[in-house]
Image (tube, rainbow, N blue to C red):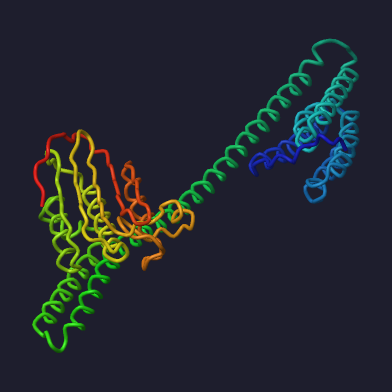
Amino acid sequence: MATDRPRTTPVARVLRVCLHLLVAGLLALAVLRALAGRDGDPAAVAAAATAMAAVYAAGPLIGAVGRSGRAAALWLALLGVTWVGVLVATPDGVWLAFPLYFLELHLLGRRAGVAAVGLTAVAAIVAYSAHQHTVGVAPAIGPLLGAAFAVATVFGYQALYRESEERRRLIDELTAARADLATAHHAAGVLAERERLAREIHDTLAQSLTSIQLLLRAAQRALPDRTEAAGEYVEQARQAAQDNLDEARRFVRALTPPALESDTLPVALERLCATTSVRSGLPVRLHVLGERVPLPVPHEVALLRIAQSALGNTVRHAGAGHAEVTLSFMAGEVALDVVDDGAGFDPEAVRTRTAAGGGAGGGGDGADGGYGLPSMRARARALGGSFAVESAPGEGTALAVLLPVPGGAGGTEEGSS
């Protein structure tokens, strides 16, 4: 068979049934007309019709006809031979050319099918002309129109089928892509939540636990001679643990930190500086510059967490004598600077080691495993801001965060704490 034979077009069951009924009806009509004495010898017509019906009925029962082009061609050739017998016996056999067109186009390839349809049309025209003893245009009109209609119908159906299959393939690909996208979004959401929890744990729990540890060590050193001082340290540690518990409950539920629930960011930073000074003994001052304007909650949370992380690392790693926190309100921007006079570190070396453990003061790996600077940088970038660290061994550390704030206003220094 020709190599261009396409995959057999799946015809709806109702169309197959209609085609079978058409062949059976035309054969029966030819026999009845012969028995009525109108066209052909009844015995010859009946024999030829029976032979063609038998061959035609065998086709659907032979599975190879639908699977193999060679088997389909052999069956159609045998069916054509029996049809020629019907043509010879009666001119009514011309009617059977129409269902044969569809069979040939359905089972054979495009070029082979068209060629078979042409041969079938020629045979029908020649046979009908022979029975009518005339040659002209009229005997050719019916078979040729039938052939053209069959070719147009089958090719149109095949084109629609190919388009339908292409659409089905595209829909399957789209469905698979949507499933992959949903999986990717889920994975991204899980990673984002893990990142959020990691930042919150580092900036709250880890810092507070460090403070508790320092307070308990101070209480331990005060015992047994200075029980009153030890009691104050223990009370501060208890309060820190309670604050820590509140923070943990809220960041698990992604709520606003307690420090920002009823107070503004400057007030929360002032409280943070005071608490850090009391618990660590490190003097920390807050300066607020510019005209204070309301900030979006995400900006306030990010700046508060960055300040917590920076001061926590200063207390743990810097060995500083004092620290300065500056919150600046500018036109369309808000800035946070945390500066200390501690031991400092080499930011490039820390970045190269991917172990940035010191915030505003403090190099090395640190107790946080180097998560401090990346966490602060991620918070700033998440809000479209910038993050920078300037430090050198023995020269202290300066940390700067700048966040864009639509609608912000500039001003002069309003106050300091």
Q: Which residue is pictured at 16% across the width and 86% down the height?
A: 223
Quadrant into which the N terminus falls: top right
Nearest to the observer: residue 341 or residue 164: 341
Q: Is residue 29 visible?
A: no
**Residue 200 rendering spot, x and y as whole percentages:** 30, 61
Q: Is residue 118 visible?
A: yes
**Residue 11 rendering spot, x and y as whole percentages:** 67, 40
Q: Quarter-wise, where is residue 258 in the image?
A: bottom left
Q: Which residue is pictured at 26% across the width and 64% down the height?
A: 315
User: Going by the picture, which residue comes out furthest to the bottom?
Assistant: 224
Q: Which residue is pictured at 18% across the width and 71% down the height?
A: 240
Nearest to the observer: residue 374 or residue 8: 374
Q: Quarter-wise, where is residue 37 in the image?
A: top right
Q: Quarter-wise, where is residue 224 in the image?
A: bottom left
Horizontal arrangement in the rendering, residue 310 relative to residue 121 (left or right): left
**Residue 382 rendering spot, x and y as whole percentages:** 34, 46
Horizontal arrangement in the rendering, residue 404 relative to residue 160 (left or right): left
Nearest to the observer: residue 57 or residue 180: 180
**Residue 398 rendering spot, x and y as whole percentages:** 29, 50
Above/below status of 302 relative to 124: below
Above/below status of 137 relative to 244: above
User: Going by the picture, which residue comes out furthest to the top?
Assistant: 136
